[in-house]
Image (cartoon, rainbow, N blue to C red):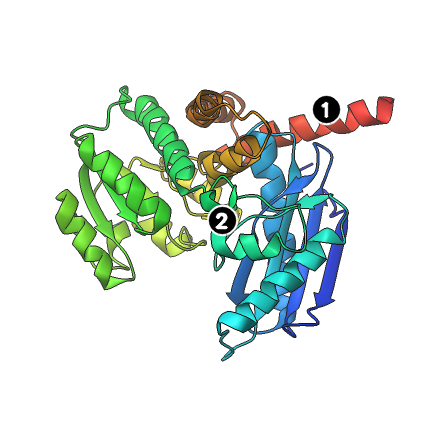
Amino acid sequence: MHSTTLPHERLSITHGPRSGLTISVALHSTALGPALGGARLWRYPSWVDAVDDSLRLAAGMTMKNAAAGLAHGGGKSVIHLPPGRTLDAEERRDAMLDLGDAVEALDGRYRTAEDVGTTAEDMAVVSERTAHVSGLPADRGGVGEPSEATAAGVHAAITATLETVLGTPLVAGHRATISGLGQVGGRLARRLAVEGARLIVTDVDPRKRALAEEIGASWIEPGDEHLVETDLFVPCGVGGALNARVIGQLRCRAVVGAANNQLATRADALALEERGILWAPDFVANAGGVIYLAMASEPGADTAAIEQRVSAIGRTVQAVYRDAAATGVTTLVAAERLAMSRIDAATGALAAV
C-alpha cells in the first residue's frame, strides 16, 4: 500500500472569520505520531483546487516523514488565495490567526510550519492562536526557517548519487545544472561552487543572475536548462518539472533536487529509468528541513545529532537505489516501500496494544 491508497484520516475546511479565506487542513496519517507539515498560502483557481492540493501534499508529507524515520505523520494546511486577491499586512495577519485557530481545533494531531507563500514571521502570528507550530523566528524563541538543513540534505543526496553513478562522492569537476535559486537552491549552489562543481544555473527571476556571477556559474535562460549536457540535473523550483517532454530531452546521468513533487505523473519515474537516468525520490532527498524542524523543536535539541540525521539522507538514498536495482522496481516504488514499511510497523504495533 502506498500513499495513494492509504486513506486520509481527516479533512478540515473552514471559512476564516477574520480573513474570509478558505483554509484546508488535511491529515493523511498519524500512525507514526502527530502529523507535521507546512502551511501554504497560494493562489488557486478555486477553493476546491486548494483542498485537493492539501490532500495531495499531506500524503506526500506522510511519505517524507516516514522515509526520514521521524515520529511524525503527514499533514498539510493550505490557505486559498482567490485569483486577483492580494493581502495587505493586516489581512495577512488575519489569515494567519485564522490558520492558528484551524490548527488548534485539531487538538495537537497536526503541527504546522512555514511552506510556500508563508514565512517564519507568519508562523509567529499563528503561534498567537496555537502552540502546535514549528519554525518560529529565532528572536521569538523559535528554531528559525529550515532552508539550510534542506540544502544540506540535498547535498548529502547528491554526493550519494555521484558515488552510485560515477564511483566518487566528490563533486569537484563534475557538472551540475541547478534550476531554481531560491532559499534552498541558492544555498546549494554556493556550497557546490565552493566544492569545485562546474555549475550551470537558472531561475525565473532574472535578478538571480547576480548569484551566478558571484559564484562563477554559467547562466542559462529558464526553460532551456534541461537541454544542457550535465552529470546532475538539480530541480529546486516548482513541482511537476519532470514531465514526459522534459524527461525525453534530459542529457544527464541523474536527477537530485530540492523541489517537491518533481514528477508530473507516477509514470515519469519509469520513463526516467527507461532512459537510464537515476532519480533520487524528492521526498527522501529534500527531507532535511522537516528533520530539522522536528528535532530542533524538541527540548534539549542536539545540534550535532540533527546534522548527523540530515547527513544520513545520503545513506537512505543509497538504500533506495540498492533496493530498486535488486528488486527491479523504480526508485519511486522503492522509496514508498521504505516509508510504508515503517508506517505498517507502527500500525501493527498500535493494533497489538
Q: Nearer the viewer, residue 339 or 78?
A: 78
Residue 275 position (above or below residue 118): above
Residue at coordinates 47% horizontally, 38% vertically from top-left? 289
Q: Secondary structure at mark 2?
A: loop
Q: Position of residue 258 (x, y in %)?
A: 40, 43
Q: Amino acid at mark 1?
A: Ala
Q: Nearer the viewer, residue 192 or 60?
A: 192
Q: On the rendered image, what quadrant is the C terminus found in?
A: top right
As drawn, the label of residue 296 is: none
Residue at coordinates 56% horizontally, 49% vertically from top-left? 38
Image quadrant where residue 155 sits? top left
Q: Position of residue 190 (x, y in %)?
A: 24, 40
Q: Tell me, yes or no, if residue 197 can be seen here.
A: no
Residue 345 position (above or below residue 78): above
Residue at coordinates 34% horizontally, 52% vertically from top-left? 182
Residue under circle 2?
Answer: 261
Mark 1 surroundings within 10 Å by alpha-carbon count, few (fewer than 14), some (14 through 19), many (20 or more):
few
Q: Nearer the viewer, residue 186 or 222?
A: 186
Residue under circle 1?
Answer: 345
Image quadrant where residue 129 sits? bottom right
Q: Is residue 230 left or right of residue 131?
A: left
Q: Secondary structure at mark 1?
A: helix
Q: Is residue 68 left or right of residue 245?
A: right
The answer to which of marks 2 and 1 sits earlier in the sequence is 2
Residue 335 position (above or below residue 51): above
Q: Amino acid at mark 2?
A: Asn
Residue 282 position (above or below residue 39): above
Q: Position of residue 19 (x, y in %)?
A: 63, 72
